[in-house]
Image (spheres, rainbow, N blue to C red):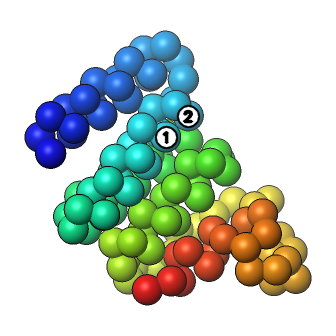
Amino acid sequence: MTAARELTKRAAEAAITADSKENAAIWWENAALREAASGDASQGVQDAADGLKLAPESQGVGVEAALAFAMASETAEPYPWPKTWTSGIRSIPRCSHFGCLLFAHNWR
């Protein structure tokens, strides 16, 4: 796991250097999913939050973060998703577009 964490850090730093914060955020979200799946919930939550800080408006980053929070059984307040993502979601079927995002966060 130590090698995977180091490689993730290096990949994210390289993406930031290349002026691609969204790609760096996706690396952190992938790490969050890996950590949550392996049972390290606190590291998974930290990695997901780090990714969201880099690209808070990215839909892809948001979806991965929601899944990581759900996998880690995060019980804190839900992340304040941008209103443009969540407007009209209540009328969308459970797993259409961003419905999965909200469903994933509440799945435990």
Q: Which residue is denoted by mark 1 in the rendering?
A: 26
Quarter location, residue 5? top left
Is there a contact, CB below 8 Å, between mark 1 and mark 2?
yes
Local secondary structure at mark 2: helix
Residue 43, image x and y in percent?
23, 58
Left or right of residue 16, residue 6 in this image = left
> Above or below — where is 26 with respect to 92?
above
Q: Quadrant of the N terminus?
A: top left
Q: Dot 1, crowdedness within 10 Å: few (<14), some or many (≥20)?
A: many
Report, in whole angstroms, how far the alpha carbon at label 1 lies from the one at label 2. 6 Å
Residue 12, image x and y in percent?
37, 29
User: Which amino acid is tagged 1?
Assistant: Ile
User: Which amino acid is tagged 2?
Assistant: Glu
Quarter location, residue 102? bottom right
Left or right of residue 82, residue 49 in this image = left
Residue pictured at 51% horizontal, 83% vertical: 107
Q: Which residue is denoted by mark 2 in the rendering?
A: 22
> Above or below — where is 9 with respect to 17?
below
Residue pictured at 55% horizontal, 41% vertical: 55
